[in-house]
Image: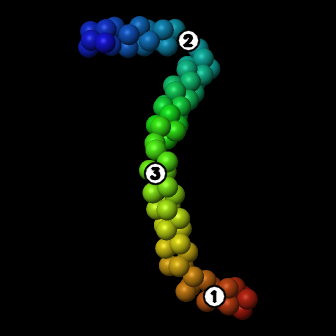
């Protein structure tokens, strides 16, 4: 699609949206957001199993690192709560 076509489409969309009620504009916004989210899901579903495994490992490791970082303070916080 050329820049001229894109600009024309954007102008048509804008002109159409301006004629809608605020409630209808809100529905258009929700639709646009759903299109964006759908695109993100498509990208996620298109990754390879190997890439998914790497991400799964990274997320799991981040969880472990976070948990280990807060555990030393956890017992002290519980004891402090018990004293209150």
| Image-based side of 80 in relation to 3, left or right | right
The residue beneath circle 1 is 75
- Which residue is depicted at the point 55% across and 20% down? 28
Locate residue 40, reporting x and y percent. Answer: 48, 37
Could you tell me which secondary element the residue under label 2 belongs to?
A: loop
Between 16 and 47, the one lying in front of the other is: 47
Q: Give the crowd class for mark 1: few <14, some 14-19, many >=20 residues within 10 Å.
A: few
- Which residue is depicted at the point 49% across and 41% down? 44
Between 24 and 34, the one lying in front of the other is: 34
The vertical placement of 13 against 56, above or below, is: above
Between label 1 and label 2, give the one nearer the viewer.
1
Please give the label number shown on residue 37.
none
The residue beneath circle 2 is 20
In space, the residues marked 1 and 3 are separated at their CA atoms by 38 Å
Could you tell me which secondary element the residue under label 3 belongs to?
A: helix
Locate residue 31, reporting x and y percent. Answer: 56, 24
- Which residue is depicted at the point 53% across and 79% down? 68
| Image-based side of 83 in relation to 49, left or right | right
Q: Indicate the quadrant where residue 24 lies.
A: top right
Q: Give the crowd class for mark 3: few <14, some 14-19, many >=20 residues within 10 Å.
A: few
Instruction: Please indicate, yes or no, whether residue 52 appears anywhere in the rendered image.
Output: yes
The residue beneath circle 3 is 50
Could you tell me which secondary element the residue under label 1 belongs to?
A: helix
In space, the residues marked 2 and 3 are separated at their CA atoms by 46 Å
Q: Earlier in the sequence, mark 1 or mark 2?
A: 2
Locate residue 32, reporting x and y percent. Answer: 51, 25
The vertical placement of 12 against 77, above or below, is: above
The vertical placement of 76 against 4, above or below, is: below
Q: Earlier in the sequence, mark 1 or mark 3?
A: 3
The vertical placement of 5 against 57, above or below, is: above
In space, the residues marked 1 and 2 are separated at their CA atoms by 57 Å
């Amino acid at each position: 699609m050329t820049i001229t076509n894109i600009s024309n489409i954007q102008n048509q969309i804008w002109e159409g949206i301006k004629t809608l009620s605020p409630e209808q504009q809100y529905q258009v916004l929700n639709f646009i957001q759903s299109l964006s989210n759908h695109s993100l899901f498509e990208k996620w579903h298109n990754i390879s199993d190997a890439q998914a495994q790497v991400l799964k490992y990274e997320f799991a490791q981040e969880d472990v690192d976070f948990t280990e970082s807060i555990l030393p303070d956890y017992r002290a916080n519980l004891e402090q709560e018990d004293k209150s």
